[in-house]
Amino acid sequence: MKLRPLLLSAFAALALATTAHAAPQVSGKQLTVGQSDVQQYLDSSFPRTQKALGGLLALTVSEPQLTLPQGSRLDLGFDLAMAAGGSAMPVGKVQISSGLRYDAQTQGFHLDQPTVDGFRPAAGSGELDASTRSLLNSWLADYARREPIYKIDPAIAKVMGVLQVKSVGIQNGRIAVDFNQNLGSFVPQGLLGN
């Protein structure tokens, strides 16, 4: 079978990567990614700005704070700032929850059906005004469609492209991906830790 040497080389590259930094763990049909690895990826990809009205308004989303509770949805907090032709002014902190999906094209995990669950204004009390909420929802939809919250190492992604993803969820503070085949059958004994 020609596929087996490709998979072995992909997992060998993964094994080398695990000695340099934390990497996804493989156990049976499951691959998991730790919260700290996802948080590090998020930290490196923010702040982000969403413009509206031909650039007259700009919403800046920064300081992502990730929590991975048990279940199928993650929690993610952001700081929001709004600029209307001048410098950005803090708006407040928004809390969202979202499902997860794996996208083979981007080789990453994306938000799936994110919802705004809470808002704490920067000053005083209040709620998101309609225009800020609309701009935030527009940014969330675009971000969920195009940008991963974590991108898989290309060596691992090659294997994931060959296998069928059965489910993506959260287990014990880690993103967990279940496949249709036992990943261990592609990896020599002892090459990857559990």
Image: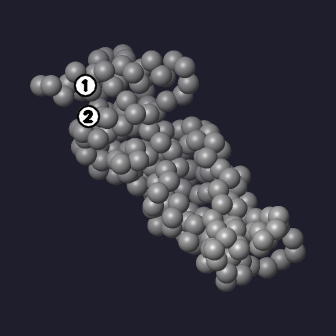
**What amino acid is found at the position of numbered circle 2 in the picture?**
Asn
Residue at (83, 77) in percent of width and height: 125
Regarding residue 105, the answer to whether it shows in the image is yes
Binning the other alpha carbons within 10 Å of mark 1 as few (below 14), some (14 to 19) or many (20 upward) gives some
Judged left or right of residue 112, residue 58 is right
**What amino acid is found at the position of numbered circle 1 in the picture?**
Leu
Q: Position of residue 157 (x, y in %)?
A: 36, 37
Q: Position of residue 118 (x, y in %)?
A: 67, 70
Residue 34 higher or lower than 86, as above or below = above
Looking at the image, which is closer to me, 69 or 143?
A: 143
Disc 2 to disc 1: CB gap under 8 Å: no
Classify residue 100 by image quadrant: bottom left
Q: Which residue is mark 1?
A: 6
Q: Position of residue 149 (x, y in %)?
A: 53, 49
Q: Residue furthest bottom?
A: 130
Label annotation for residue 16: none
Residue at (70, 62) in percent of width and height: 60
Quarter of the figure with the C terminus: top left
Residue at (53, 60) in percent of width and height: 143
Residue 148 higher or lower than 32, as above or below = below
Q: Which residue is mark 2?
A: 182
Q: Position of residue 68 (x, y in %)?
A: 56, 50
Dot 1 lies on which element? helix
Mark 2 or 1, closer to the camera: 1
Binning the other alpha carbons within 10 Å of mark 2 as few (below 14), some (14 to 19) or many (20 upward) gives some
Q: Residue furthest front?
A: 54
